[in-house]
Amino acid sequence: MVRLAAASLVGTAIEFFDFFVYGTAAALVLGPLFFPTFSPLAGTLAAFGTFAAGFLARPLGSMLFGHVGDRYGRRPVLFASLLLTGCATVAVGFIPTYATLGIAAPALLLTLRFLQGLGLGGEWGGAVLLTAEHAPAHRRALWSSFPQIGPSIGFLLANGVMLALTAGLSDAEFRAWGWRVPFWAAGLLAAGGLLLRSSLAETPQFEELSASGRRAGAPLAEVVRDHWRLVLLTAGALAVGYAVFYSVSTWALAYGTERLGVSSTVMLSCVMAAVAVMGALTPLVALLGDRWGRRPLCLAGCAASALWMFPMVALLHTARPLLMFLGFLGSLLAFITMFAVIAAYLPELYEPRVRCTGAAVGYNLAGVLGGALTPVVATTLSDGGSGPPWGVAAYLTLVALVSLGCFALLPETLPDRTGRPTPEPAAA
């Protein structure tokens, strides 16, 4: 389990490094480089629009790789998704800017971001099922939480590199070539991840399905026909997690640097410190999920998100590093209260024959609802006025309340002492 958990964690860390480095670059530099004819606000919105394309691609990636995972095994998904995301990320680092290619530059940027999202849409399902289907039932949330630590590590790596570059280079050097370095580094990380995953075994549950001839012939069709309500509920439930995380990691970064005049170094440091605490606490929260259940923690995290969004926006608007850090930390602690147990919860909700497709589609559809739109909506709502952007807080609170309602309609899946979930996944 340690080796499997490490391989899942490293893989998700690498893929989310690729995904997050784009988001940071979109907040800091992609607008003026690829959309120079736009106003500063319009350029930021355009950059966040290409950022959103990755989220729109993620459900498609989950359908594609989910089919592979349910038909041919979880293991092939881990290789193909990592390879696709790594290649697309490296290619972003080589795109000439608008000054050289004109309109073709943002078009290429959009295409590669779409391919990034396609790969990431498959990564989560494969990595989570690798641990969830190997783990003992009474510790499934704990072991499945390790892939959920990967995004924190990927975020810290991506922003740590960006922080070092913005601190060590002049603004002209960073805009000329410095922002490309993290994208080039993604190639080395992807090669290391593929090497680490080369010795992984297929999961016992998939091998049992193969041996018994019970693999789904058309997993997506079966999910749509038999589990559509569950997919919509899980997508709505998880939307708040994406909205909260990307409001902190992407929108707040742009808002702090552009509207509040805080240096990008200070903003990145505040966000990174909060993410580091969140990552360290993830397995501890998952242990609570193994003890008390998945659903109670998800409900608590949603409620905490709804209550904290207005204080978070108020603390951000102070532009004082310690207060901003506290605002970000409160948001991310509410977020991880839900997402530490999601890697166990979602697979338990779906029967094994369609688990890779169902869990991944629900998870990544939530990314469209909560992650793709949040930076764009928040940037629009925060435009104009000198006071705190209360419209952003109201929007995030509304998303949290909708997600709370969706979680309330989902069943508990905490296994009993025999390892059986209650209720059974088919009943969900």
Image (cartoon, grey):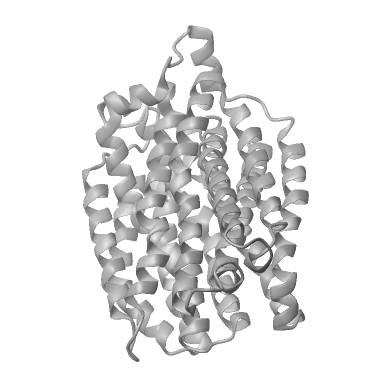
Closer to us: 346 or 423: 346
Quadrant location of the C terminus?
top left
Q: Is residue 293 visible?
A: no
Residue at position x 41%, y 22% in the image:
219
In the rendered image, the vertical position of residue 405 relative to residue 219, given as above or below: below
Residue 93 appears in the picture as rendered: yes
Residue at figure coordinates x 42%, y 34% from the top left? 347
**Residue 152 vs residue 142, the one in the foreground:** 152
Residue 89 located left or right of residue 148? right
Residue 13 in the image, given as x and y percentages of width and height? 63, 52
Q: Is the residue 37 above or below the residue 288 in the image?
A: below
Q: Is residue 383 above or below residue 348?
A: below
357 and 308: which one is in front?
357
In the rendered image, which quarter contains the N terminus? Answer: top right
Tell me which residue sits at (31%, 67%) in the image. 396
Q: Front-most of 394 and 56? A: 56
Q: Is 56 positioned to the left or the right of 421 in the image?
A: right
In the rendered image, which quarter is residue 379 located in?
Answer: bottom left
Please give the count of numbered marks on the rendered protein: 0
385 horizontally vs 359: left or right: left
Q: Position of residue 373 (x, y in %)?
A: 38, 60
Residue 404: x, y in percent?
A: 25, 55
Q: Is residue 362 above or below residue 420?
A: below
Q: Quadrant of residue 152?
A: bottom right
Residue 155 percent coordinates (x, y): 59, 61
Q: Is residue 309 left or right of residue 210?
A: left
Q: Give the residue drawn at x 66%, y 61%.
A: 101
